[in-house]
Structure formats: C-alpha cells, structure tokens
C-alpha cells in the first residue's frame, strides 16, 4: 500500500482522517489561498483542494495525497470565512440567524506515481434557528468557534443552533467528506477497512 499524506494543517481534518484507522502523515501545503476574480465559492474549494494535494504530491510522487478546502456562503451569495474573533463570530451568527449557509467542501486525491487524480466538491446546506443575542453569547462563551466558518461547530454544541443539515456526507461539514474520500482512496489503491 502506498504511503498516505494529508495535505493540511487543519486539526479537524486530521481528526476526521484518524477515524478511518489508516496510517498517514501530515504535510502543510504551500498554496496561495486567495480567491480568484470571478470565481464561485464552489470553484474556489475545488481549485484549492486540488492545488493543496498537488503541492504535496509533487514532493512525494509515490504517496497518495489528500487535499481539501472549504468555502461557505450565506444564502448562496455572501462568502463567510472563519471569524477569528468574538466580535466577528457574533456578527456571523446574527447574520445566519433564521437563514441558510451552504458549505462547499473540496476534496482531491492524487497519486502521481500511478497517474491518479480526482477532485470533487460536496455541498452541505445548513439552516440556522432564529437566534437571540443572548443565545449567541451563551454559545460563544461555552464554545468559542472562532476557527470555523459560520462560527458554529456542528460536531459540538453548535448543533443546538441549527434547524437542519442537508447533504450526502455529514463529515463534509466538518471539513473532510469521509464517504467520498473512502471511495476515492479505494480507486487510488488504499482500501478501508
């Protein structure tokens, strides 16, 4: 079995990949993550996932490399990033209250030695409950989700802020769609389990 590398510095993606019980290493990809002019959020997630995988695969041609990236939009229009601060998280949650966010999770699996490359995007629609300022403050005091686009961790207490999640892969929302990944890894020569 070829070595497996996760081209990411995300602890969430690392934790998700660990669920599959396969040995892997982590390498930070050197990629400019700026959005290109006229690019849709889905296209950005697709392009960056592929670039991250290729950046690491070009240094480890014998390895199967996983790249992933995620973008989010509010009601399919306004791009939502990681808040980075309490004030921005409050702002994001107020904006999301009673509305829907769409998360576009790009996934790329590359094995250059075998000539394998496949990239896809998994969309997840998340509808927020109507939230009061008090609910937002209580949530952020208990779970400061400043490193999560949309400011709510669905895998934690943030689930209490949500009305519905619609998608084909619940792990895509966290940042690495394991259902799609398992299929792509099998095509690249890594069977799980």
Image (cartoon, grey):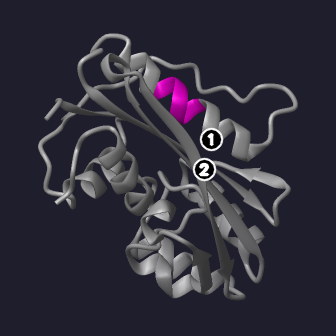
Position of residue 88 relative to residue 116, above or below, is: below
Kindly report the secondary structure that dominates the magenta region of the rendered protein: helix
Residue at point 55%, 76% (across, down): 137
In the picture, the disc for residue 45 is 1
Local SS, label 2:
strand
- Left or right: 189, with 134 as reference point: left
Q: Earlier in the sequence, mark 2 or mark 1?
A: 1
Q: From mark 2 to mark 1, how far is it between C-alphas? A: 7 Å
Residue at point 31%, 17% (across, down): 113
| Residue 82 visible in this rendered orientation of the protein | no
Quick one: 71 or 68, which is closer to the camera?
68
- Left or right: 85, with 43 as reference point: left
Circle 2 Cα neighbour tier, 10 Å, few/some/many (<14 / 14–19 / ≥20): many
Quick one: 113 or 35, which is closer to the camera?
113
- Residue 93 at what x, y percent from top left? 66, 70
Q: Quadrant of the N terminus?
A: top left
Query: Contact, CB < 8 Å: mark 2 with mark 1?
Result: yes
Q: Choose top left, top right, bottom left or bottom right for residue 112.
A: top left
- Residue 83 at what x, y percent from top left? 59, 51
Q: Choose top left, top right, bottom left or bottom right for residue 144.
A: bottom left
What residue is pinned by disc 2? Answer: 121
Residue at point 55%, 58% (across, down): 86
Circle 1 Cα neighbour tier, 10 Å, few/some/many (<14 / 14–19 / ≥20): many
Region of the chain picked out in magenta, as a range: 48-52
- Left or right: 108, with 17 as reference point: right
Magenta span contains residue 40: no
Position of residue 144 relative to residue 161, above or below, is: above
Quick one: 158 or 76, which is closer to the camera?
76
Quick one: 123 or 163, which is closer to the camera?
123
């Amino acid at each position: 079995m070829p070595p497996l590398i996760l081209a990411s510095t995300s602890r969430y993606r690392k934790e998700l990949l660990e669920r599959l019980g396969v040995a892997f290493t982590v390498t930070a990809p050197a990629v400019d993550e700026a959005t290109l002019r006229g690019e849709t959020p889905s296209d950005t997630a697709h392009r960056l996932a592929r670039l991250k995988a290729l950046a690491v695969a070009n240094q480890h041609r014998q390895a199967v490399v996983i790249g992933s990236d995620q973008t989010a939009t509010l009601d399919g229009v306004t791009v939502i990033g990681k808040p980075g601060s309490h004030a921005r998280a409050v702002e994001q949650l107020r904006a999301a209250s009673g509305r829907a966010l769409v998360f576009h999770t790009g996934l790329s699996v590359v094995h250059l030695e075998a000539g394998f490359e496949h990239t896809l995007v998994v969309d997840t629609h998340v509808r927020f409950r109507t939230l009061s300022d008090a609910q937002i403050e209580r949530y952020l005091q208990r779970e400061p989700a400043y490193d999560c686009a949309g400011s709510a961790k669905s895998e934690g207490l943030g689930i209490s802020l949500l009305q519905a999640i619609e998608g084909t892969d619940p792990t895509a929302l966290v940042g690495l769609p394991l259902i799609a990944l398992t299929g792509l890894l099998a095509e690249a020569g890594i069977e799980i389990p």
